[in-house]
Image (spheres, rainbow, N blue to C red):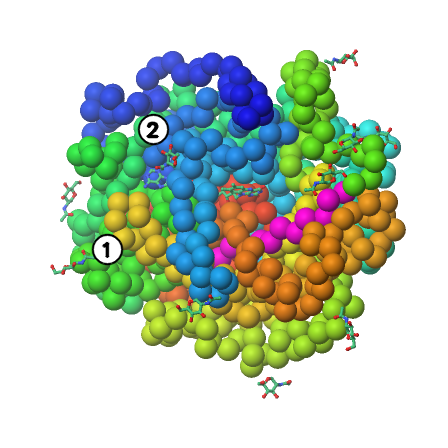
């Protein structure tokens, strides 16, 4: 209670509205919106703001961003890294809930998503990791020339304003030594290390070393398997959150050719066949064309239309973008029939191939006397931390919840349990691993979807699970003793489908593929070995939850199934793959069967990268702007 009151008192930043009226509030839309724009960007989150910024560099084109949420008010709960984990500001959340998870415990899960200018980057944990070279080479191998690691690297650099300001002592003990050749220093998005780290970070890294996990001097140079202090998307100078609004929008909102309308929810893409009769594009016959979107200020308000001459660019996130395509007539014909939507393009992959990193928290309370953790931030200590933050931009409030992470490779998990060999059999026996018996009929009735999924599983087996640079699991450490275990691979696939206005049936089908939960069970075993069998972690005097309970395989499996939740890495639902692999967009991110509908958000990842995904989302959006080619019609 005391904390809640205190947080409320932090909301003292004033909201600065940019001059010029280019930020369009709901009451002003009729007056201020142009009748037509060149580009309409749907969603002003991470990807949408990157694209809006880059497109509007050309003063000859007009760009409109329609965003369902509002501008955040720069309150401490958003900007102060040390306040991550205190919950999402309710107004900035879409409040999604999954359907009951039949392969876990039949219960639903909350699934928060950003409903605010800046999208997920206003709510996220700021962890900035790219994943491994092989993650992107797998995208390329799935039929996407030009999307391998070497192709992505220039765009990772283009987004970044990277800096390192850590003392030589800390750099040495915590193994922080980034490789300047893979970082950008003049991009819009500041990425850096916080001014403060809890001592437990060092115990974690040393403990993982004892278990044979290598320490990475730079986790973003193409090798992801190992333990690390991860950089964060935060400003080096004021140690506060850096997000897509502050990086990509605020500095350019004065551009007269860029309009942002907030609190406007797009409900449909307007699709016609205007002028496309001469474009023959097998297997679709001819391409359809978008000429605008329909939007509304609320469920009760009337729907409005706004037109565009070049493209509609969907950046509404991996959950909503496919739903918008479906209600606009682009999706699996059988589903659209059920929804009474006229089919414009029969594209079975829309809303399928959903991926995430299933995540389980395990609690090992560190009880060493005198240890400092976020638990100590109460009373006077909290007041001092706050004062130090605002006076000097130092101290515990500069540090995000998660700074210390490991992505162990599969081979690091051996010796964890007796049944490791049966687990390895599961992963390496192609017959079992690539079995399709767990897929729902809505997937198996489409041969292209089955081919695409099989191609993904085969890549997971042949390269991603064996490449020593790729982690199989993630373990995130906070200062209290929570070790959060996630599967870095996503073998299960799911689908989302649109029901009513922004009412989306989201079914991640967590652990429908047996490898996912089996891996998490090994991950929990590995975390117990880390705290129980290493000297470095023993120093923290960890306490096992439910002491005395025998942690048998069955007990851990039950625990995993009860706890699995999202890591907020929704992706894959508008996958960049060829049509014959069930893809939704091609390698220019244009939706198959359309001339001018693009998707640029996290949904286009054909395989989710084995890391936190925002760095990839920023870079994909930077890259697509470079390849924008309007199909002439
Ligand atoms: C709680 C949380 C924690 C996370 N932590 C991390 C982390 O530590 N590190 C990391 O790398 N990644 C993290 N992520 C993931 C990362 O933030 C997302 O992957 C990223 O934001 C996805 O970008 P996007 O452009 O696809 O979608 P978003 O950023 O979600 O943007 C979509 C935008 O579209 C708007 N929109 C949606 N539908 C409509 C509509 N119909 N009309 C108008 N506007 C619409 C939304 O309001 C939103 O602003 C986290 C995500 C969350 C939610
Ligand atoms: C999510 O819930 C909060 C609190 O209940 C509410 O304020 C907010 O408007 C909801 N978000 C949406 C998109 O409806
Ligand atoms: C979930 O529900 C299904 C169908 O009702 C049932 O068969 C299954 O046993 C349930 N699973 C759990 C873990 O409760
Ligand atoms: C921190 O600095 C960045 C620029 O480096 C700026 O965009 C942001 O608004 C500042 N944040 C706060 C909370 O002062
Ligand atoms: C053609 O485009 C115009 C706007 O440019 C729109 O008003 C009209 O409805 C479209 N026709 C069809 C058949 O989609
Ligand atoms: C589709 O139309 C049929 C017949 O009008 C109706 O019975 C059904 O409820 C509609 N389905 C949806 C999802 O609106
Ligand atoms: C963790 O340990 C501390 C110090 O011994 C104790 O005060 C606290 O109650 C414990 N918390 C939990 C959740 O067990
Ligand atoms: C932090 O709190 C714990 C009890 O929760 C206490 O044991 C420890 O001494 C405190 N640390 C500091 C630095 O005050
Ligand atoms: C970390 O450890 C050092 C040396 O033991 C100690 O001086 C320092 O106060 C500790 N820092 C925190 C944040 O606990
Ligand atoms: C800010 O830093 C100065 C110089 O190191 C120090 O003297 C002062 O106590 C600090 N202020 C706070 C509030 O921590
Ligand atoms: C491994 O198997 C042996 C013999 O079957 C058993 O005694 C031991 O408890 C098992 N260890 C684990 C961690 O399951
Ligand atoms: C793979 O598993 C299947 C089904 O259990 C079994 O028949 C086959 O012999 C296994 N193959 C190998 C190489 O172990």
139 with respect to 198 (left or right): left
Q: What residue is at 78 percent from the left and 58 percent from the top?
A: 529
Q: Which residues are magenta?
A: 354-366
Q: Which residue is mark 1?
A: 329
31 and 87: which one is in front?
87
Quadrant placement of the N terminus: top right
* Main secondary structure along the magenta-highlighted residues: strand
Q: Is residue 131 magenta?
A: no
Secondary structure of the residue carrying numbered label 1: loop
Is 265 above or below relative to 429?
A: above
Classify the position of ligand 3 by quadrant: top left, top right, bottom left or bottom right.
Answer: bottom left
Point out the tag, 1 or 2, that comes first from the N-terminus.
Answer: 2
In this rendering, the label closer to the viewer, 1 or 2: 2
Pointer 1 local density, CA inside 10 Å: few below 14, some 14–19, many at least 20: many
Q: Which residue is mark 2?
A: 262
Pointer 2 local density, CA inside 10 Å: few below 14, some 14–19, many at least 20: many
Q: What residue is at 62 percent from the left and 76 percent from the top?
A: 426
Q: Is residue 358 magenta?
A: yes
């Amino acid at each position: 209670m005391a904390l809640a009151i205190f947080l409320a008192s932090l909301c003292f930043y004033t909201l600065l509205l940019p001059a010029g009226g280019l930020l369009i509030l709901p009451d002003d839309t009729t007056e201020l919106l142009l009748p037509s724009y060149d580009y309409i960007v749907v969603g002003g989150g991470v990807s949408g703001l990157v694209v809006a910024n880059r497109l509007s560099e050309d003063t000859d084109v007009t760009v409109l961003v329609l965003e369902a949420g509002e501008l955040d008010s720069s309150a401490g709960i958003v900007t102060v890294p040390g306040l991550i984990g205190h919950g999402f500001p309710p107004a900035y959340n879409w409040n999604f809930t999954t359907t009951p998870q039949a392969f876990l415990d039949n219960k639903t899960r909350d699934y928060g998503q950003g409903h605010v200018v800046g999208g997920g980057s206003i709510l996220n944990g700021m962890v900035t990791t790219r994943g491994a070279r092989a993650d992107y080479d797998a995208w390329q191998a799935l039929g996407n020339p030009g999307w391998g690691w070497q192709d992505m690297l220039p765009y990772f650099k283009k987004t970044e304003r990277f800096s390192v300001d850590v003392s030589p002592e800390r750099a040495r003990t915590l193994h922080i030594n980034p490789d300047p050749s893979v970082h950008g220093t003049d991009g819009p998005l500041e990425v850096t290390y916080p001014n403060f780290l809890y001592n437990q970070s060092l115990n974690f890294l040393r403990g993982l070393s004892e278990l044979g996990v290598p320490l990475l001097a730079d986790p973003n140079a193409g090798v992801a398997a190992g333990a690390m202090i991860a950089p964060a998307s935060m400003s080096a100078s004021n140690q506060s959150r850096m997000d897509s609004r502050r990086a990509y929008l605020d500095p350019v909102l004065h551009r007269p050719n860029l309009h942002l309308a907030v609190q406007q929810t797009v409900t449909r893409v307007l699709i016609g066949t205007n002028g496309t009769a001469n474009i023959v594009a097998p297997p679709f016959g001819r391409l359809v064309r978008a000429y605008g979107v329909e939007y509304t200020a609320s469920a009760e308000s009337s729907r409005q239309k706004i037109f565009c001459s070049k493209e509609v660019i969907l950046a509404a996130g991996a959950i909503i973008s496919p739903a918008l395509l479906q209600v606009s007539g682009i999706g699996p014909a059988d589903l659209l029939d059920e929804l009474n939507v006229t089919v414009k393009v029969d594209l079975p992959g829309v809303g399928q191939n959903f991926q995430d990193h299933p995540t389980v928290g395990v609690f090992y309370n560190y009880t060493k006397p005198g240890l400092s953790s976020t638990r100590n931030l109460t009373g006077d200590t909290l007041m001092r931390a706050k004062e130090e933050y605002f006076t000097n931009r130092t101290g515990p409030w500069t540090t995000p919840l998660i700074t210390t992470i490991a992505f162990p490779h599969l081979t690091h998990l051996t010796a964890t349990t007796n049944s490791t060999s049966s687990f390895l059999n599961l992963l390496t026996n192609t017959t079992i691993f690539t079995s399709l018996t767990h897929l729902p009929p809505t997937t198996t009735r489409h041969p292209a979807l089955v081919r695409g999924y099989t191609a993904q599983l085969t890549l997971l087996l042949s390269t991603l699970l064996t490449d020593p640079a790729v982690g199989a699991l993630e373990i995130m450490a906070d200062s209290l003793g929570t070790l959060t275990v996630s599967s870095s691979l996503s073998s299960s696939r799911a689908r989302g489908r649109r029901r009513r206005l922004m009412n989306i049936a989201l079914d991640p089908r967590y652990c429908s593929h047996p490898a996912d939960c089996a891996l998490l069970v090994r991950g929990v075993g590995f975390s117990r070995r880390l705290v129980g069998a290493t000297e470095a972690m023993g120093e923290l005097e960890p306490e096992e939850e439910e002491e005395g309970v025998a942690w048998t395989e069955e007990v851990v499996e039950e625990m995993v199934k009860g706890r699995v939740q999202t890591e907020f890495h929704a992706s894959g639902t508008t996958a960049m793959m060829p049509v014959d692999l069930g893809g939704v967009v091609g390698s220019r991110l244009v939706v198959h069967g359309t001339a001018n509908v693009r998707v640029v958000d996290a949904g286009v990842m054909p395989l989710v990268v084995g890391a936190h995904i925002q760095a990839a989302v920023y870079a994909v959006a930077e890259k697509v702007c470079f390849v924008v080619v309007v199909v002439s019609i």
